Image (cartoon, rainbow, N blue to C red):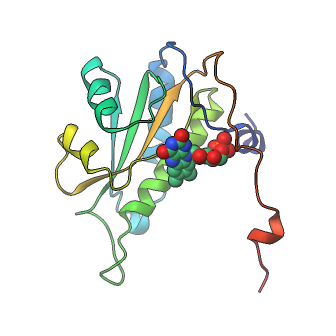
Amino acid sequence: MDFEEVIRKRSSTRRFSDKTLEREKLDKILEAGRVAPTAKNMQDFKIFVIESEDAIKKLDEAHPCRYGAPTSLVVCANNTESFSSDGKHASGVVDACIVATHMMLEATNLGVDNIWTWAWGNQKLAEVLNLPENIEPICVLPLGYRSDEDHGSHMHDQRKKIDELVEYL
Ligand SMILES: Cc1cc2nc3c(=O)[nH]c(=O)nc-3n(C[C@H](O)[C@H](O)[C@H](O)COP(=O)(O)O)c2cc1C
């Protein structure tokens, strides 16, 4: 898909069908995350693939927004490998978001429906997945194929005008 088409076509899916996500597509999506840029190239992130019955059950216990997706990626910051220039702001969260964005756009490129869902601060999710203390969930990306019952993303076309968002100084 042309890049312009990818960024226009991407929209949030909140009802997935049972159709499983092909392994080759998942591999490509994960690869798009692997090659994402990170601060100082620290690669301070970790991705967990949620596909087994057991893992899905655990995810559902702690996270309300899987929307029936057969595969979900829990994208985390690795806070012990993060870079900070001021001792206060660490790169892990930013890098995890860039990685997740790469994967979301590659999913769209491959015709795989997706949605970014918030997991930052979800301590229960870290607990049920038994994550080490330095691994902090930032977002969950449910992936798969839109159900016929999905009515589309209600806020997709509601964007501010460019001059509200951009200022030339
Ligand atoms: C950082 C972030 C957090 C989000 N968290 C959730 C969420 O927890 N649940 C949800 O249903 N949608 C979530 N969304 C999806 C947004 O609501 C959606 O992107 C926005 O309404 C624009 O619609 P579109 O993605 O279809 O263009 C999140 C999106 C972002 C970028």
- Left or right: residue 58 versus residue 141 is left
In this rendering, is residue 127 above or below 111? below
- Left or right: residue 25 versus residue 85 is right
In this rendering, is residue 97 above or below 68? below
In this rendering, is residue 118 above or below 111? below
Residue 90 drawn at (x, y percent): 35, 71
Q: Is residue 150 visible?
A: yes
Q: Is residue 101 visible?
A: no
Quadrant, the C terminus: bottom right
In this rendering, is residue 105 above or below 152? below
Total numbered circles: 0
**Residue appearing at x 62%, y 28% in the figure:** 110
Q: Quadrant of the rendered structure where residue 161 is?
A: bottom right
- Left or right: residue 152 versus residue 60 is right
Quadrant, the N terminus: top right
**Residue appearing at x 43%, y 59% in the figure:** 95
**Residue in the foreground of this view, choosing between 114 and 159:** 159
**Residue appearing at x 19%, y 44% in the figure:** 127
Q: Quadrant of the rendered structure where residue 42 is?
A: bottom left
Residue 68 drawn at (x, y percent): 47, 22
Q: Quadrant of the rendered structure where residue 79 is?
A: bottom left
Residue 109 drawn at (x, y percent): 65, 34
**Residue appearing at x 25%, y 45% in the figure:** 124
Residue 88 drawn at (x, y percent): 32, 79
